[in-house]
């Protein structure tokens, strides 16, 4: 193995541990003329990055130098510009947000699900929905859920860890994207799903509280795991009230079903907020319209960007 400490290589931050960053790189053994994948280094960062006000999060592409292969240590000297950024959980360069929602244990919550979808939309990252624990419901009920999400404008992959239904389709989807973030409320089975998809990971899990009908937080930090060549999957801490910041005039565009109508025809007034204005083209009978209206009124009354939760 080449222990030359002057090498400078590019890698991706896969985890944050205390004041250190774990960076995964590919390196070449000059003697064997062979690349080794998934080599991880415990890294600090150059002080100049702090002076420049550059934050480093999981998913950031960085340059590392002063590499000590023997002790698996290095120093981060540069950070590349991000192509996307998800604020909560904080992950850079996300290409897909997969929002896990359970049909039971805990029960499906339309408002909560919408908040997660709106969070992804705020970050300009098109999400998909993963419906978990489908072995707990009938096939007819499952079809109703899938049609519901389709009417909202979202694809849905239904899975069950118990009978492996939908797992192959999910793996295929994740391997088509570079960095997928698994997000969603606590207890819906995100960590269990990762353990099933990547058995070598063996992350700790916990059961859903029967009293509160919600899960406890097993994942304490964000970490990236390889799932196929060149594809990474992020497990994230579960939380139940994601924050959404948006101006009232932009809020409707976070709903795909509203976007579809606004792309076909325009409201009479350019500053229409799609409440009771004359000439508004938004269909008020859409399932999520009451949620939109309630959230919009909250924004306007507070004179601040909307904060869900």
Image: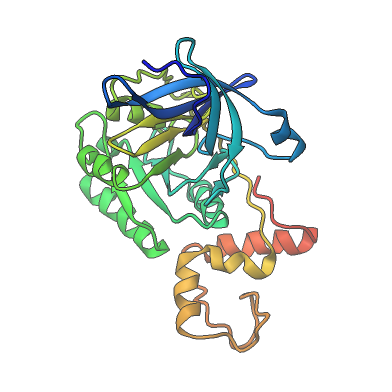
Q: Nearer the viewer, residue 221 or 152?
A: 221
Does residue 216 show up? no
Residue extending furthest top? 71
How many numbered marks, from 0 up? Answer: 0
Residue displayed at 47% across by 46% down: 94
- Vertical side of 236 occupied by 270: above or below: below
Q: Position of residue 25 (x, y in %)?
A: 42, 29
202 lies left or right of 290: left
Residue displayed at 29% across by 47% down: 176
From the image, which quarter does the N terminus lie in? top left
Dividing the picture into quarters, in which one does residue 33 lie?
Answer: top left
Way the structure is coloured: rainbow
From the image, which quarter does the C terminus lie in? top right
Q: Position of residue 157 (x, y in %)?
A: 29, 47
Dividing the picture into quarters, in which one does residue 251 lie?
Answer: bottom right
Q: Position of residue 147 (x, y in %)?
A: 31, 59
Residue displayed at 44% across by 56% down: 126
């Amino acid at each position: 193995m080449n222990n030359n400490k002057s090498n400078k290589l590019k890698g991706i931050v896969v985890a944050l541990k205390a004041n250190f960053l774990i960076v995964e790189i590919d390196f070449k053994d000059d003697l064997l003329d062979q690349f080794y994948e998934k080599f991880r280094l415990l890294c600090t960062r150059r002080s100049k990055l702090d002076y420049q006000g550059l934050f480093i999060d999981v998913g950031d592409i960085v340059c590392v130098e002063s590499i000590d292969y023997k002790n698996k240590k290095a120093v981060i000297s540069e950070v590349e510009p991000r192509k996307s950024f998800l604020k909560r959980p904080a992950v850079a360069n996300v290409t897909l947000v997969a929002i896990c929602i359970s049909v039971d244990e805990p029960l499906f919550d339309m408002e909560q699900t919408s908040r997660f979808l709106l969070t992804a939309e705020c970050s300009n990252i098109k999400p998909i929905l993963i419906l978990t624990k489908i072995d707990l419901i009938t096939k007819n009920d499952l079809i109703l859920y899938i049609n519901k999400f389709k009417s909202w404008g979202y694809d849905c992959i239904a899975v069950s860890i118990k009978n492996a239904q939908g797992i192959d389709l999910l793996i295929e989807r994740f391997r088509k994207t570079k960095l997928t973030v698994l997000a969603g409320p606590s207890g819906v089975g995100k960590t269990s799903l990762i353990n099933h998809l990547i058995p070598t990971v063996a992350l700790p899990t916990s059961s859903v509280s029967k009293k509160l009908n919600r899960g406890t937080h097993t994942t304490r930090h964000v970490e990236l795991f390889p799932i196929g060549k060149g594809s990474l999957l992020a497990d994230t801490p579960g939380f139940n009230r994601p924050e959404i910041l948006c101006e009232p005039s932009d809020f409707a565009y976070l709903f795909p079903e509203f976007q579809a109508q606004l792309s076909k025809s325009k409201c009479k007034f350019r500053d229409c907020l799609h409440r009771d204005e004359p000439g508004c083209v938004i269909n008020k009978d859409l399932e999520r319209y009451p949620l939109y209206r309630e959230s919009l009124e909250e924004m306007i009354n507070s004179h601040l960007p909307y904060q869900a939760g």
